[in-house]
Image (cartoon, rainbow, N blue to C red):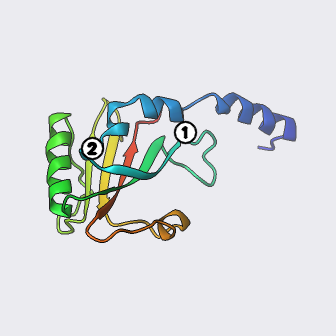
Amino acid sequence: MRWSVAGLLLASLLLAGCGTTASAVEREPEAGLYYPGSQVVFGKTESQSGLCIDDCHPARRWVELQTSASPSQVMTWYATALRQRGFTLSPYDRGADLTRRSWQRNSGGAPGYGFDVFIGVASSSVASSLPFQPGRTYFQLSFSVPNS
């Protein structure tokens, strides 16, 4: 099947309004589920990819935070808080790595809501420019919502 440039443009415009938006993600209570007393260092929210050619992904929020709590305190708090909200450990969670945990909550469809906690920082330009302070725990959150 051959697509004309006009046909591709029309399809792109029609799909641009589809999907979960960044603002819808930010209205979800889990988008702001931060360990008590932690400080946000960096955050970014993305809408669901409309055209799934090179970058297929659900709508999601990433946040880098810091706290004076220990890594085990952070993970224990998230395990409790997420369980109370109906999340269970993801089948992809390997359990052996206590610095990275992954939870999910289905919304009647796959894949459902996802919530990941990673102790440490990403190897990104943002992370490399952080003013690290001794005695602080740095961690990342990733929250994703089901595709609409």
Query: The disc labelled 1 sits on which kind of residue?
Result: Ser
Pointer 2 with pointer 1, Cβ within 8 A = no
Instruction: Note whether 14 is above or below 2 in the view shown.
Output: above
Query: In which quadrant is the N terminus drawn?
Result: top right
Q: Quadrant of residue 112?
A: top left
Count of picture labels: 2
Tell me if mark 2 has few (under 14), some (14-19) or many (20+) residues whose alpha carbon lies within 10 angstroms of its own: many
Residue 35 drawn at (x, y percent): 25, 47
Q: Is residue 78 visible?
A: yes
Q: Is residue 112 visible?
A: no
Instruction: Note whether 16 is above or below 104 in the view shown.
Output: above
Residue at the spot x=20%, y=62% of the render? 71
Q: Quadrant of residue 80?
A: top left
Mark toward the viewer: 2 or 1: 1
Q: Which residue is mark 1?
A: 47
Query: The disc labelled 2 sits on which kind of residue?
Result: Gln
Residue at the spot x=58%, y=42% of the render? 49
Give 101 or 62, whichever is nearer the viewer: 62
**Direction from residue 1 to residue 55 in the image, left or right:** left
Residue 115 drawn at (x, y percent): 31, 46
Q: Quadrant of residue 29?
A: top left
In primary-sequence order, the first of circles 2 and 1 is: 1
**Direction from residue 15 to residue 93 in the image, left or right:** left
Residue at the spot x=19%, y=65% of the render? 98
Tell me if mark 1 has few (under 14), some (14-19) or many (20+) residues whose alpha carbon lies within 10 angstroms of its own: many
**Direction from residue 1 to residue 17 in the image, left or right:** left
Work out how far the residue at label 2 is from the one at label 1, CA to CA, in angstroms: 19 Å
**Direction from residue 19 to residue 33 in the image, left or right:** left
Q: Which residue is mark 2?
A: 104
Residue at the spot x=34%, y=33% of the render? 109
